[in-house]
Structures are given as C-alpha cells and as structure tokens.
Image: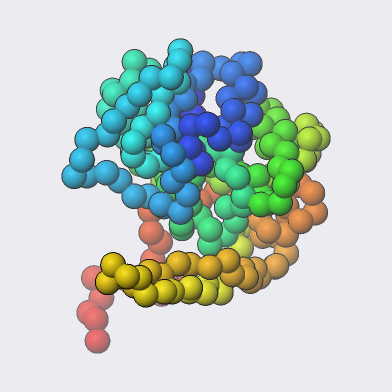
Amino acid sequence: MRILVTNDDGIHAEGLGALVRELGRDHDVCVFAPDQERSGVSHAMTLRHPGRVRKFGEREYSCSGTPADCVILASLGALPFQPEVVVSGINRGPNLGTDIIYSGTCGAARQASLNGMAGIAVSCATFNDPLYYGAAAAFMRRHLARLVELCDYGVFMNVNAPSSEETDLPGEWAVPCRRHYRDQLRSFEAPDGYSYHFLADSAIETHEDAGTDHAVVATGRVAVSPVLVHPQVPAGFVAGREFR
C-alpha cells in the first residue's frame, strides 16, 4: 500500500519515527508532517497563506500548516506521491473519547476520509515518561489491512495503545468515552498593555464505562474505535417536520 504518514507532534517526533519504521517494512511510505508541534488544532486548515513544503530526505517532507493541511496538499498533488491510505501518529498522549474533537492527529484521519481514503489515527495513550511506542507500531503493522478494510467514506479508525515495548498486545473494539476537562486559567497584566492568559494543567475526568476506549486501554489492550465523520441527527428527529 502507498501510505502517507503524518501527525500533530511535528516531523521530528519519536512516535512518527516508530510508525514509519514498522510500516516501511511492508509498504511504500511517505512522511508529510507539520514542521513543528500542532497539538490541539483539531481540523484547522490554512486558507489565507500558502503552505510551505520542505524536503528533508527521500519521501520525507514537512509542511508549515496543520495535519489536515498535509492530507489536503498531498491529495491534490503537492508531493510526487499519491497516497492510498493515511496513518496519523503515533501521537504522544491519548486521543480517547472527547479528545477526538480537539486532536490534530484525528483531524488528519478525518480529512483522509473526506478525501475518499482510509484514515487511521493512532496514539500512545499516556503522557508519562518513558513512552514506549512499540505496542502501537507493531499493532498497526499487524492489523493495517484489516483496519483499512473497515474504513469507508464517512468513517475513520481511532487506535489507542498502552505505552509498552510488547509487540503482541491484543486489540478490542471500543466506543469513545466521555471526558471532562477541568481547565484552569493563569493570567497576568503585562507592561505592553496586554493581559496574557494561559490554560494551566488541569484534571481530566473520564467516565470509565465498560466497553469504552479508556476502559480497554486500562486493561493493557489496544482500543479500536470507528469514528463517524458526518454528523448524526438525534433519535426522533424527522427532516421536513415543522419546527414549533
């Protein structure tokens, strides 16, 4: 398969390198990733400025834009490589449940689906050092064909693996969990006349329901979740009915 590998941690990220080494053993791989960290950009796109592309090596390129930009530009011919599949990751940290909304890693996989390609987001579900990407990378190599087969227009796959050097962790289907971010703000008034506001480290409350991606990863398995790209209407909604 012709695979485009991207991420939101930047082209020099350790997780990206681990993924490329594994997938490159069996497939034709091209790297096209942001030139610096773009965590938390979700599905942002660059619309008012050109995307600057730099070649680092054979089939290794950086982009001045976002993860979604990388997929868009590659699909439209910015590279001498036309991908069939997009694999985004391996992200440093989890993309569990509600994280999917904010994640640049997932934004790239979503854009792949919108462009008619299989899109897979993969993350190492911890922030604690040392991070081991071996489990996620090996899982992707073993199950890539199956994951691609399950993708279609309107669905991308979200994979979260424990931090582990083990190469044979089992996978399990999971639904995305619900997470609440108890954000805190740190602010100060500066001599330049501006006030500056920073989101401080805060607690994340996770609903640990059975069958969720968080629950699966907590048991040492790899969580695999299909994610719908197109919005779904609530039960009971009927299009065309008068709104009262």
> Does 223 sit left or right of 180 as displayed?
right
Q: Residue furthest left?
A: 48
Q: Quadrant of residue 150?
A: top right
The quarter of the displayed image where residue 18 is located: top right
Q: Residue at x 24, y 86 (%)?
A: 244
Query: What is the total number of numbered labels drawn onto the structure image?
Result: 0
Residue 167 vertical position relative to residue 123 in the rendered view, above or below: above
Furthest residue toward front: 191
**In front here: 20 or 1?**
20
Residue 167 higher or lower than 81, as above or below: below
Q: Identify which residue is drawn at 50% across, 55% down.
A: 100
Q: Is residue 219 visible?
A: yes
Q: Residue at x 41, y 70 (%)?
A: 197
Q: Which image quarter: residue 194?
A: bottom left
Query: What is the x, y in percent for residue 143?
Result: 65, 31
User: Residue 96: horizontal and vertical position, in percent?
Assistant: 60, 56
Q: Does the image show residue 179?
A: no
Position of 204 relative to 83 (above/below)? below
Q: Is residue 83 rendered to the left or right of residue 239? A: right
Q: Nearer the viewer, residue 118 or 26?
A: 26
Rendering coords of residue 57 (x, y %): 45, 15
**Residue shown at the point (41%, 34%) measured from the top left:** 35
Q: Which residue of the protein is positioned furthest toward the bottom in this rendering?
A: 244
- Give left or right: position of 145 versus 6: right
Height in image: 194 above or below 172?
below
Question: Percent position (x, y) of residue 105?
Answer: 49, 44
User: Camera-side residue: 71 or 118?
Assistant: 71
Image-based side of 159 in relation to 119, left or right: right
Q: How is the image coloured?
A: rainbow
